[in-house]
Structure formats: structure tokens, C-alpha cells
Amino acid sequence: MGRYAGLTSRGQLTIPKKVRDALSLKAGDTVAWTVMDGLLIGTPRNLRFADLAGFLGNPPGGPATLEEIDAALGDAVGRHAAGDRDGSGRA
């Protein structure tokens, strides 16, 4: 899909309605802008955390209990605080 947008004297762009609709953009949404090889790339950042549920598929070994998650986070924080970034036991 290709559309044109004019740049205002204040440096603002209006994203065309067909583009906003195709990306489900609404007022207040954020768009991340990147320049790559002379091209301007706009990536919508309008997903909620809940929209990502199941994105990675089922966890290996099945779902974890809250206690297992809490223990794993505690271990990871402890390793991070000790400088052990890869879980090898070395700082």
C-alpha cells in the first residue's frame, strides 16, 4: 500500500486514513520511526501486553505455577546481582 503525506512547517506528518485503518492506529498511539538506507520506516507500537499472549507458543514442559515462576525470577535476579549473566556460575 502506498500513500502520500505532506510535511507541515512544524515538521508534522498526517498519516493517511487508509494507512491508519490498515494498521489499526488511533489517536494517542505511538509510531517508532527508523531511517534505513534512506527510507523512513514507521512501525506502530499500539499493541497491549495482552495482545502478545501465546506469541511464543506453549512453554516447554507445560505451564509453570506461580511458585515456579517466582523461584525462577529470584534465581535470575540473584545471578544478575552476582554478575553471572549466562548462568554458568562465573562472574
Image (cartoon, rainbow, N blue to C red):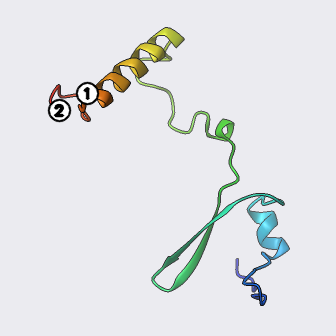
Q: Position of residue 78 (x, y in %)?
A: 32, 22
Where disc 1 sits, the SS reads helix
Q: Which residue is drawn at 75% across and 83% down?
A: 3
| Placement of the C terminus among the 4 image quadrants | top left
42 horizontally vs 59: left or right: right
Mark number, residue 22: none
Which residue is situated farthest in the front direction here?
A: 81
82 horizontally vs 71: left or right: left
Does residue 28 lie above or below 75 as drawn? below
* Residue at mark 2: 91
CA–CA distance between discs 2 and 1? 7 Å
Where disc 2 sits, the SS reads loop
19 horizontally vs 33: left or right: right
Mark number, residue 82: 1
Q: Residue at x 70, y 77 (%)?
A: 1
The quadrant in which residue 27 appears is bottom right
Q: Which residue is drawn at 45% across and 83% down?
A: 37
Kindly check if marks 2 and 1 are in contact, taking CB atoms under 8 A apart as contact. yes
The quadrant in which residue 28 appears is bottom right
